[in-house]
């Protein structure tokens, strides 16, 4: 059977039917999944059948089994963790990316998708106010983007100390010091673990989780040798931004490489109104962000930006005989850990093209405005207290004691009309709200506030 359209059509037609059904249901369905992974497994798992079945029937079976187990993350009333929901253009572009099936590792081999990714990269650097000469790698998420930035950092600080880590490895190398704010995201630790750099030294943070520059300066002065400093744009709980101008200046004065984890916060730079939050951050050496959070493209899509292309290419490129004739400098695969790779920048291009510069600014500002609306509404609920300074997309709430906060959080999740997750911040239980979805509108905010009011009032489960 050759790969003719007629061979694909029945399965793709069914996929479109199921996509239409799912997207139609998202605005009104309860947010939480309606069943468990074990129950889904019971209906589609078991021993591998000996005989196959037609692709369209496989798609029907898959959709029927999986749908009750899907969480409505794309709902305008989903505020859990820091997620987002796909917009139409990047979703459709993602379908095409799969359909085109390009292994987008080398420019000359897959010029179409490579060019789209280059265009997206140029737009991103412009939009975020970062150096136009930087390298951009499209990877799976901000964890990987942190890994890329810190991998380039490891190369450079060791090269500056006369050590070639790519050849000699870490054994016997000068010790690399890594300093990071006490409220850094755990993925920074994970990336450092992959790189053999261990757990960073925690630098004290202020009451919003921002790194304290005086403490950073003291830590930097207390040691020497190859040094990496990790800063943060967008604290998971408060949304706060590190004081980049001062922190980068003091880090650079000590010869450190500065990496910025801005998984969701980097996008503040795309708004003239919010840009002040990242003031001075363009002087850093590398930045990590997600397109699957604030930009609302489908999973999985992270972006690593490295001011020094030679450093990232030294860490991640690979020259090999069997790529002969297709390999030049700065190929897509030279900026990410993968060799074979999906053209993850294509949905980014589509999102940016659909929004335009103004649309991206409005998207980010809209999320922040919704966060303020939710915070103001919740502050009016009896017993509720907003415990962070809301300056970006994050809101943290307590309802008196930790016990009561956890109880309200549980009831809210069981209620299902809105979805906000629980956490612990600054030694208190909190209900955490992250406004990350482009589709959240006035009605979503009103319904969500009503759900919080309802669950905060009732001692028992909502009727
Ligand atoms: C989500 C997040 C990450 C990790 O991103 P993934 O895309 O999940 O890998 C890193 N840092 C911050 C601040 C985040 O919010």
Image (cartoon, helix red, strand yellow):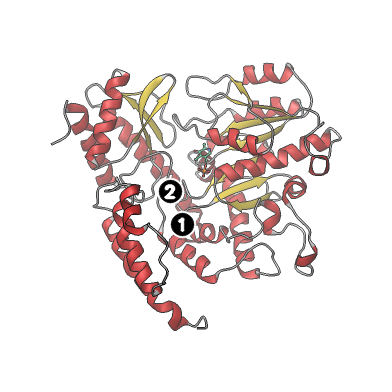
Res 288 → quadrant: top right
Tell which of 262 and 188 is nearer to you: 188
Question: Marks 1 and 2, Cα distance to the nearest angstrom?
Answer: 9 Å
**221 relative to 194 in the view: left or right:** right
Instruction: Residue 381 in the image: state x and y as whole percent.
Output: 23, 27
Does 242 sit left or right of 161 as displayed?
Answer: left
The label shown at residue 210 is none
**Rendered-image quadrant of the C terminus:** top left
Picture quadrant of residue 415? top left
Q: Specify the label residue 355 is tagged with.
A: 1
SS category of the residue bearing label 2: helix
Tell me if label 1 and label 2 are in contact, CB under 8 Å. yes
Label 1, ligand 1: CB separation under 8 Å? no
Which quadrant would residue 162 be assigned to in this image?
A: top right
**Which residue in the structure is indicated by mark 2?**
362
* Image coords of residue 165 (percent x, y): 80, 40
Residue 108 shown left or right of residue 425 in the figure: right
In the image, residue 257 sits, relative to residue 166, either above or below, namely above
Q: Is residue 266 above or below residue 61?
A: above
Query: Disc 1 on helix, strand or loop?
Result: helix
Task: Tell me if residue 376 can be seen.
Answer: yes
Mark 2 sits near ligand 1, with its Cβ under 8 Å away: no
The number of callouts visible is 2
Residue 148: image location, x then y, percent:
65, 44
183 or 281: nearer the eye? 183
Q: Nearer the viewer, residue 246 or 34?
A: 34
Q: Residue furthest right?
A: 162
Q: Does 410 appear above or below 91?
A: above
- Residue 333, position as x, y percentages in the image: 68, 57
State whether residue 399 appears in this view: no
């Amino acid at each position: 059977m050759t790969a003719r359209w007629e061979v694909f059509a029945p399965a793709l037609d069914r996929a479109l039917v199921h996509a239409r059904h799912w997207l139609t249901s998202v605005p009104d369905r309860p947010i939480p999944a309606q069943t468990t992974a074990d129950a889904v497994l019971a209906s589609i798992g078991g021993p591998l059948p000996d005989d196959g079945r037609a692709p369209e029937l496989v798609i029907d079976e898959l959709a029927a089994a999986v749908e009750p187990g899907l969480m409505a993350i794309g709902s305008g009333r989903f505020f859990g963790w820091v997620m987002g929901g796909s917009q139409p253009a990047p979703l459709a572009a993602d379908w095409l990316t799969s359909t085109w099936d390009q292994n987008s590792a080398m420019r000359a081999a897959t010029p179409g998708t490579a060019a789209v990714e280059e265009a997206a990269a140029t737009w991103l650097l412009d939009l975020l106010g970062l150096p136009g000469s930087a390298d951009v790698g499209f990877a799976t998420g901000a964890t990987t983007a942190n890994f890329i930035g810190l991998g380039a950092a490891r190369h450079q600080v060791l090269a500056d100390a006369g050590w070639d880590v790519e050849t000699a490895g870490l054994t016997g190398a000068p010790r690399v010091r890594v300093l990071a704010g006490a409220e850094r995201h755990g993925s920074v630790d994970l990336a450092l673990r992959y790189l053999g750099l261990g757990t960073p030294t925690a630098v004290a943070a202020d009451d919003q989780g921002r790194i304290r520059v005086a403490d950073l300066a003291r830590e930097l002065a207390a040691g020497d040798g190859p040094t990496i400093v990790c800063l943060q744009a967008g604290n998971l709980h408060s949304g706060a931004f590190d004081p980049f101008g001062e922190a980068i200046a003091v880090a650079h004065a000590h010869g450190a490489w500065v990496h910025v984890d801005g998984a969701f916060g980097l996008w503040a730079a795309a708004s003239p109104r919010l840009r002040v939050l990242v003031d001075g951050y363009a002087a850093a050496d590398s930045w990590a962000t997600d397109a699957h959070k604030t930009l609302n493209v489908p999973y999985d899509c992270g972006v690593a930006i490295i001011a020094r292309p030679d450093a990232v290419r030294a860490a991640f490129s690979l020259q090999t005989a069997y790529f002969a004739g297709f390999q030049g400098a700065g190929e897509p695969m030279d900026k990410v850990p993968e060799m074979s790779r999906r053209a993850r920048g294509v949905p980014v291009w589509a999102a940016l093209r659909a929004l335009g510069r103004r649309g991206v600014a409005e998207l980010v500002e809209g999320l922040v405005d919704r966060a303020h609306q939710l915070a103001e509404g919740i502050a009016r609920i009896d017993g509720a207290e907003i415990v962070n300074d809301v300056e970006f997309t994050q809101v943290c709430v307590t309802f008196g004691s930790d016990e009561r906060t956890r109880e309200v959080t549980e009831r809210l999740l069981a209620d299902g009309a809105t979805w906000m997750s629980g956490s612990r911040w600054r030694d208190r239980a909190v209900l955490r709200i992250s406004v990350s979805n482009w589709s959240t509108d006035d009605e979503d905010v009103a319904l969500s506030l009503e759900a919080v009011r309802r669950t905060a009032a009732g001692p028992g489960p909502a009727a």
